[in-house]
Amino acid sequence: MKIVINSHIKNDIALQHLLDSMKILPEFNNFEHFIIIGGYYHINNYEITKNKNLVYIKCNHNSIDFTGLITLLELKFNEIDYYFYMHDTCKVGNRFYKILNSIDLTNITTIKINKKCSMNIGIYSQKIINEFKDFLLSKKNTSSDKLMEFKSINYNEDYIFENDKSNKILDNFNLKKIKQKPVNYYNTGTMRIVEYYSNIDLYKIKANWGQGKWFLNN
């Protein structure tokens, strides 16, 4: 399984915070990590660089949560590949990689981390990504002017999970709100709550938590 981190050109602080939590773990070097960064509207095509087990992919689109999935589709990776797909606004715990290693992927197409809203976070096969080609391409955004409209209208979060008839929910589901009140977690001025998913040992630092306003980056 590969790790895919969905990111944005302006999210350096969040991305580094996540990578720091990963790099201290002994299993980090056993996984290949794709860091897919949206918002490079000025480039003509995907730009890919590699540093050991970190593959950085710059994208000339910003499709919010779907940036990484669209990129995996368009770069035509191997159909036998599986990914744990996450946002840069996360932090992992000590058991994160151990849990991933323990997951049986036999006959799996997708696995969501939450009974309800999983924020598109979870496991995807390349095969299922390819099968949802039309949907994903309909979510490709290449204009900064349309970004807010794109996110706030017919956003379709968890669409693939909800429309994959073989979708599973990760075992031992348990969600806990670590920060009951919003905090300026990254010291960037955006107030966030922190949720913890014990079944994958993952913290999600959320800006979109029902406060009546959409943010450009979650």
Image: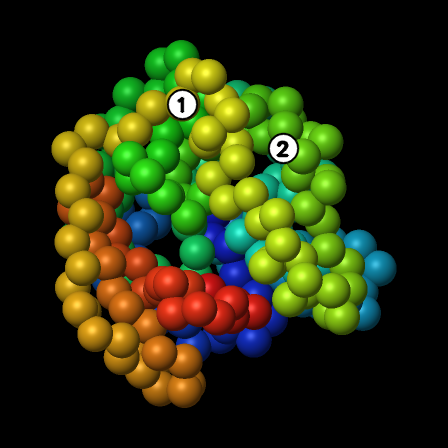
Q: Secondary structure at mark 2?
A: loop
Q: Is residue 136 among the parts visible in the rendering? A: yes
Residue shown at the point (30%, 29%) measured from the top left:
169
Q: Is residue 93 among the parts visible in the rendering? A: no
Residue type, mark 2 in image: Phe
Cα separation, mark 2 vs mark 1, equals 21 Å
Q: Is residue 174 left or right of residue 207?
A: left
Residue shown at the point (16%, 42%) measured from the top left:
174
Residue at the spot of label 1: 167
Residue at the spot of label 2: 77
Residue extending furthest toward the right = 44
Residue type, mark 1 in image: Asn
At which x and y percent is residue 94?
16, 53
Mark toward the viewer: 2 or 1:
1
Name above or below for residue 218 compared with residue 87: below
Name above or below for residue 123 compared with residue 213: above
Residue shown at the point (47%, 39%) measured from the top left:
158
Dividing the image into 4 quarters, which one contains the N terminus?
top left
Q: Secondary structure at mark 1?
A: loop
Residue shown at the point (38%, 69%) measured from the top left:
211
At which x and y percent is residue 148?
64, 66
Looking at marks 2 and 1 on the same chain, the residue that comes earlier in the sequence is marked by: 2
Name above or below for residue 167 compared with residue 148: above
Residue extending furthest toward the front = 212
